[in-house]
Image (cartoon, helix red, strand yellow):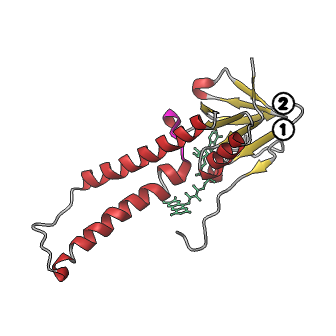
Amino acid sequence: MAEQFDVTIIGSGPGGYVAAVRAGQLGLKVAIIEKEKDARLGGTCGLRGCIPTKALLNAAHLYQKAGEFEHFGLKVKDLSYDWSGVQKYKSDVVAKNAAGVTYLMKKNKVAVYNGFGKIAGPRLVFVNGSFAAKLSRLPDSGFTQGIAATAKSCSPGCASPYVTTILRRCRPSSGS
Ligand SMILES: Cc1cc2nc3c(=O)[nH]c(=O)nc-3n(C[C@H](O)[C@H](O)[C@H](O)COP(=O)(O)OP(=O)(O)OC[C@H]3O[C@@H](n4cnc5c(N)ncnc54)[C@H](O)[C@@H]3O)c2cc1C
């Protein structure tokens, strides 16, 4: 039996999850599909882009600052770093961010499907993986929105004429 949604979104990066939150806030019935293992949400930005790199930069910045402490009359004995500890800090930040996105989905009543989303026809989305049996069918009237927020990893299956919106969160020119 196919599940019915007003909006089905493929991809849980900043493009996808922000759209899901907004659609949920507007009272629509929303599904988001993410192929990442264990349905870790947040996309490239949250899992291996902006968030982890900024966590590492933060640690590097503190390390550099600690090396300048003497200038301020402060003393640090045997300054060094533990790379596995830095990696753990980075992984903790990533996990916290992914959990935050999961919480946002729950709060806005967005159904999360873990698997590969593929647009199979007009208003019909298949999900592979752990929810292979479930289909998502958008209703024929009212709100009928399919959103592909899959960034560069978009496969031929999601580059479909049936998608009404292609979201891509553009990198700001400042790069921040
Ligand atoms: C190292 C690095 C550092 C970055 N730093 C910054 C920064 O500091 N500031 C900034 O603004 N931007 C930064 N970016 C860019 C930022 O990550 C992207 O602009 C942003 O992630 C794009 O968001 P998106 O939602 O369009 O796509 P993504 O975040 O890539 O999300 C797409 C999601 O769709 C999923 N997906 C794809 N196809 C399917 C499918 N068929 N079925 C189910 N799921 C699917 C993917 O698994 C992924 O989770 C950085 C990127 C990198 C690589």
Which secondary structure, mark 1?
loop
Q: Are marks 2 and 1 in contact (CB under 8 Å)?
A: yes
Q: Amino acid at mark 2?
A: Pro
| Prevailing secondary structure class for the magenta stretch in the rendered image | loop
Q: How many marks?
A: 2
Q: Quadrant of residue 12?
A: top right
Which is nearer the eye, 154 or 13? 13
Q: Is residue 109 visible?
A: yes
Q: Which mark is residue 155?
A: none
Relative to residue 153, is residue 158 drawn left or right?
right
Q: Tell which residue pokes out farthest to the right in this image.
A: 141
Crowd around label 2: few <14 · some 14–19 · many ≥20 (10 Å): some
Which secondary structure, mark 2?
loop
Residue 58 sits above or below residue 130 on the image:
below
Relative to residue 84, is residue 162 drawn left or right?
right
Residue at 27% of width from left, 72% of height from top?
64
User: Is the CB of mark 2 within 8 Å of ligand 1?
Assistant: no
- CA distance separating discs 2 and 1: 7 Å
Q: Is residue 150 visible?
A: no
Residue at 78% of width from left, 49% of height from top?
165
How far across and down, in percent of the image, does residue 14 sit? 60, 52
Look at mark 2 in the image and give the residue it sits on: 139
How far across and down, in percent of the image, does residue 145 sit? 80, 41
Which is nearer the eye, 145 or 142? 142
How far across and down, in percent of the image, does residue 5 sit? 75, 31
Look at mark 1 in the image and give the residue it sits on: 143
Q: Tell which residue pokes out farthest to the bottom in this image.
A: 71
Magenta segment boundaries in residue numbering: 38-42
Considering the image in quadrants, where does the N terminus appear?
Answer: top right
Q: Amino acid at mark 1?
A: Phe
Relative to residue 141, is residue 63 drawn left or right?
left
